[in-house]
Image (cartoon, helix red, strand yellow):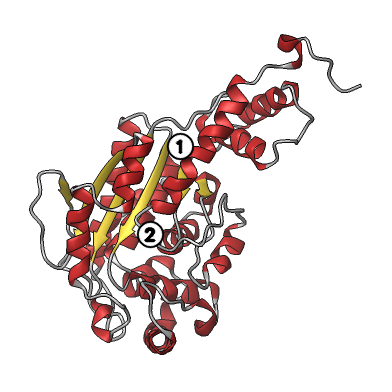
Amino acid sequence: MEWLNTPCQIPNAAAMEAARWHQSQLTKPAGSLGELETIAIRLASLQGRERPTADKVFISVFAADHGVAEEGVSAFPQAVTAQMVANFLNGGAAISVLAQELGATLEVVDVGVKTPIAHPRLISQRAGAGTANSAIEAAMAHNQLALALQAGADATARAQAAQTDLFIGGDMGIANSTAATAIYCALLDTPVTEATGSGTGLNSAGVLHKAEVVQRILNRHHQHFGQPLEVLRRLGGFEIAALTGAYVRAAQLGLPVLVDGFISTAAALLASKIQPAVADWLIMSHTSAEQGHHFVITELGQRPLLDLGLRLGEGSGAAVAVPLLRMACALHNRMATFAEAAVASKL
């Protein structure tokens, strides 16, 4: 896993300043488009050009099962992971519809679904048939962690080869909100009761039980909380590891990332702990309705683009935010300047 130590790219300061100057020349009062201006300028710095674009979007959905599902922490049975992978591939899932609407590339990567799936469009980079139960032992072995991280890095490399403007990582894995919650608590010292939410739709008794399981996980592995890779190996899932690898590699390649919700943000937190410079390449798409998400948003110093009460995962929240980025780019690139429109600028 030596590649994790490769330095990240540095956002292009000259492109940022050029974009900022261009914004100042557009036919509007300075700052009147608010965050749309900020988005365009930041994208310019990440893409290294004064005129940014969000036309080419590459979405990788990583799927895997979790041994901690044995603890009854999800409202859905574990078989749903494989069933939803088939749904992604057959075009019936939310992310499938959103990708089609966006004209985005969508790929699905099996990094550890319990029951292997045969499909011509499924990418198989399995680290195992689901993780072990983290409430009892480490979720994965060292070699499994390496395989899952590499699966994410490989997806980002495919995105770069496709000359994409923006990378989105999605997730699918029953019980993965339990793993993500444990990661939040381990890395941020967040109280379990404040970080644990309903996930797939648990009732209040189910949330209480889930919090108890998260606390057991933390108690078992607490001596390793100062090491982000060990936190990932012991508490995480193969799809969370793949997302972590994707985010680190994206920053190394200089590829902007639009981060999805609760699960994806756990991976973003891990990636930024492995390499702090990763955070420069992450754009938070939305605030998840899942309890505890705001703790990581604060830690990463980000302002999410949307707050729509979403908690589906799959990369869906990030996909919903893409049109907003496209509008920001269109305004930046196509509005007339004061000189072009023969409009008097501010006195």
Disc 2 marks a residue whose amino acid type is Gly
Image coords of residue 88 (percent x, y): 23, 51
Residue 254 got which mark?
A: 1
Specify which label sits upstream in the sequence, 2 or 1: 1
**Residue found 28% across the figure and 53% down from its top:** 93
Disc 1 marks a residue whose amino acid type is Gly
Mark 1: few/some/many CA within 10 Å (<14, 14-19, 20+): many
Q: Secondary structure at mark 1?
A: loop
Image coords of residue 34 (percent x, y): 70, 40
Image coords of residue 297 (percent x, y): 57, 61
Which residue lies most toward the right here?
347
Res 150 seen here: no
Q: CA distance from mark 2 to mark 1?
A: 25 Å
**Residue found 31% across the figure and 73% down from its top:** 175
- The answer to which of 274 and 33 lies nearer the viewer is 33
345 vs 157, left or right, is right
Rendered view: 297 above or below 13: below
**Residue found 18% across the figure and 62% down from its top:** 83
- The answer to which of 204 and 302 lies nearer the viewer is 204
Q: Secondary structure at mark 2?
A: loop
Residue receiving disc 2:
313
